[in-house]
Amino acid sequence: MKYVLIVAAFLLTGGSVWSQTTASSFNFVEYQKTFPRTSDAWKRKEDTLMKQFQEKGLAWPFRYMYVRSFKYDSQLEVWVKYEQNEPFKLFKTYKVCALAGTLGPKRMQGDYQVPEGFYYINEFNPKSQYHLSLGLNYPNASDRILSDSLQPGGDIYIHGSCVTTGCIPITDQQIEEIYILAAHARSQGQDFIPVHIFPIHFKNQRSSIYLDKYMKDFPEYAPMADELKHAYLYFEKTKKLPVIMVSKKGDYVVEGAIPVTPDKAKVVKKRDPRPAKEFTGEIAAVVNKLPVFPGGNTGFQAFIDKLSHEMAQYLEEDQKKAYVMVEFVIDKEGKPGYTKVIKGGNDELNDKLIDAFDKMPNWTPAVRLEQHVAVKLKQSLFIERLETSSTKTGGPTGGTAAN
């Protein structure tokens, strides 16, 4: 089974709405300030926001922003950070004015549902009829598969005016703050500001009870709710965003094992991991042509599909699925080797994967400046304990990536 990462190009329109074609050399914040409504908001709000950041020990200007919203709990959180690899920190929780529809995803135009899932801000509208608004990329890759093919709906925003027919409404004062924060993140280079919409705040016991009752009436919703909860718990533990994919059926697949606190961790006897063999030759960082598996991408896909099916038997009892990232070298003769698992799996599974990758047939080697060179590749696999296991992959230019 192939997956796609939830990353896409901006699909914005012109007029007062910002798009990436708008004078790239022009500072985005300054551009937003050319509109009367946003200019006025900046004059009233920017100093206050800076002081709030200072009081909470947060860097200003920050560089990264993350928004998550909880439908049933009517909350919207804004998280920020300065460095890419540091954890996010909570800036503020806002009250959402109203909830349209019920729990569950949006599936068609006119259903008044607030979407659930993983989105990003793709539009800044300083002339919104709802004061100010931030558009979301609904329908995303999942929605385009699972929603009504002719009328999936659209025009989903975080906006002011405190009214809704399927959006996320807040007060005008609140949208001014969030709009300014998002504009600052965009100006700092964050092209995709993630917005994750959850059915409930999973730490709220009352909300969890309501969700359980809802799923008894709508059991088909349970798999999606489980993946949403997985993403929520991963962020709660790490304060970092998980990798999120969409299967060919449109289902979300959330990568990332949720860390277990030491007092709750199982006591399991672990053997020492296999020592990794390091390649001592020169690794090409840039090549003119990537190495090719015998049979090309189709042959490599068949190899990965078969391997994923075989590896399912090595999942531990409490593992229903595993997302594993493997790194390996194709030397200048085309011989594979020096494999190591850099993410996921378990001891036995990882040993089997290393053996399988090291024993691959020789590839057609990579080429740089008309010379054969060694390259290091990464391959992700998604392994499930099912009758037929699945994998996220592509050829060496898709699921496999050269360092």
Image: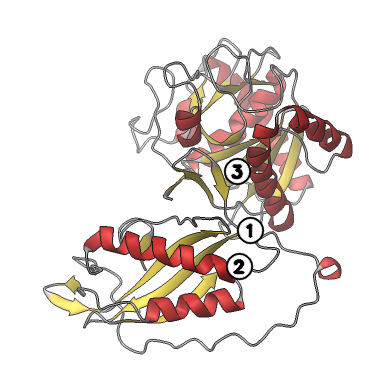
Nearest the eye: 202 or 157? 202
Do labels 2 and 1 touch, CB within 8 Å?
yes
Horizontal side, residue 139 vs residue 264: left or right: left
Query: Residue at image x 64%, y 45%?
Result: 227
Name the foreground residue: 244 vs 318.
318
As drawn, the label of residue 315 is 2
**Residue 242 place in picture, x, y as percent:** 59, 53
**What's under tag 2, amino acid-wise?**
Leu
Q: Nearer the viewer, residue 200 or 178?
A: 200
Q: What is the CA distance from the residue labelled 2 to the residue labelled 1? A: 7 Å
Q: Is residue 93 visible?
A: yes
Identify residue type, mark 1: Lys
Q: Amino acid at mark 3?
A: Met
Please state which of the two labelled residues, at mark 1 or mark 3, is closer to the viewer.
1
Which residue is outermost to the left? 370
Q: Secondary structure at mark 3?
A: strand
Q: Is residue 307 above or below residue 388?
A: below
Can you see residue 94?
no
Identify the element where label 1 is drawn: loop
Mark drawn on residue 152 = none
Q: Where does label 1 land, which residue?
A: 320
Q: Nearer the viewer, residue 308 or 347?
A: 308
User: How many numbered marks appear?
Assistant: 3
Which residue is located at x 19 percent, y 73 percent? 364
Q: Looking at the image, which residue is at 45% across and 57% down?
A: 391
Labels 1 and 3: the sequence-earlier one: 3
Which x, y percent locates residue 241? 61, 51
From the viewer's perspective, is 76 left or right of 180? Answer: right
Q: Which residue is mark 3?
A: 65
Q: CA distance from mark 1 to mark 3?
A: 32 Å
* Residue 210 horizontal side relative to residue 146, left or right: right
Q: Quadrant of residue 90?
A: top right
